[in-house]
Image (tube, grey):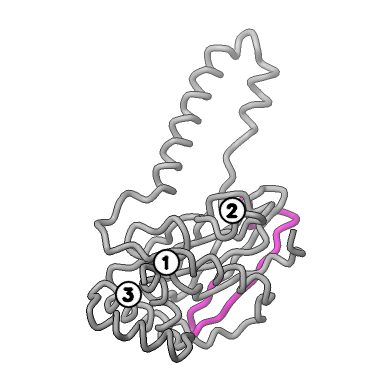
Amino acid sequence: MTEIHALSGAYAVDALDDLERVAFERHLAECADCRAEVAGLREAATLLAETTANEPPAALRDRVLAGIATVRPLPPETPVPRPRHRRVRLLVAAAAAVVLVGAGAVAWQQPWADETSQQQPPTAQSVLDAADALSTSLDFPGGASATVTHSDSVGRAVIVTSKMPPPPQGKVYQLWLDQPGEGMVSAGVMPVKEDQTVLLSGDAATATGAGITVEPAGGSTAPTTDPIALFDFGRSDA
């Protein structure tokens, strides 16, 4: 059964039927990668279970779980530079180029230079300070918490964490935006830090929600495990 690897998340949270469980346990005895995956997921579930928050809409959770079922977990790999960091470096380089061009053109094109200089990339603070900012918070056992704030006018979302426990060894917390017609789209990998504020990549103005999953080091192109947290943006599904 080529898709049996994808059952590791459901097995870790006891969500398989009897036939699936028997088949997966037979496979588990022969697959070291799946044994490590199940152990890591159960460790994360122990740390972050019993979330005390409003239950997200059933349609949001069903859509996320349906997408996970079609993805096989990637084997452990050497961490690679995070895409979010590379994007920040590109934005800084682009901003520097704009400044240089503007400095040369200021003598004869001042009105355009003034207008351009006011257009800055979104920041976490610009999202938090936006007049239309809306927040959804989750509390975890042990005093940990996470709040996702999104702004349609800025078009971005921010997650603020407090006392967040580290992910299992060899794993990362990955952020996602639930986009209509696309499902869960990667919004970056969270640094390992208890208290932090992270700007999600992607268009939050079109997203219906956000989520966190535990993924192999370096992140995944699509969720490979059940989400440990879902944040509903309060929009009706498209």
For residue 139, what is the image quadrant?
Answer: bottom right
Q: Secondary structure under badge 2?
A: helix
Quadrant of the rendered structure where residue 32 is?
A: bottom left
Q: Earlier in the sequence, mark 2 or mark 1?
A: 2
In the rendered image, residue 201, in percent from the top left (x then y), is placed at 53, 50
Q: Nearer the viewer, residue 137 or 112?
A: 137
Say what amino acid the circle numbered 1 marks. Answer: Tyr
Mark in the foreground, 1 or 3:
3
Kind of element beneath mark 3? helix
User: What residue is pinned by disc 3?
Assistant: 37
Give how far across and how far down residue 186 sits, in percent: 50, 56
Above or below, 61 against 103 in this view is below
Q: Residue at x 37, y 66 (%)?
A: 73
Instruction: Report how far apart the C-alphas of labels 1 and 3 lie in the structure.
Output: 14 Å
Alpha carbons under labels 3 and 2: distance apart: 36 Å
What residue do we see at 72% from left, 48% from top? 153
User: Tag 2: residue type?
Assistant: Gln
Closer to the eye: label 2 or 1: 1
Q: Where does label 2 land, which residue?
A: 125
Give x and y (percent) for residue 101.
52, 17
Instruction: Provide the secondary structure element on which disc 1 rests.
Output: strand
Q: Which residue is mark 1?
A: 173
Of labels 3 and 2, earlier in sequence is 3
Name the residue located 67 percent from the left edge and 19 percent from the top edge. 112
- Horizontal side, residue 172 vs residue 63: left or right: left
Number of the front mark, 3 or 2: 3
Q: Over which residues does the magenta segment extend?
A: 126-146
Residue 181 located within the stretch drawn in magenta: no
> Tag count in the figure?
3
Q: Give the Cα distance between marks 2 and 1.
A: 22 Å
Closer to the camera in the image, 173 or 106: 173
Q: Residues within 10 Å of mark 2 (few under 14, many from 20)?
A: few
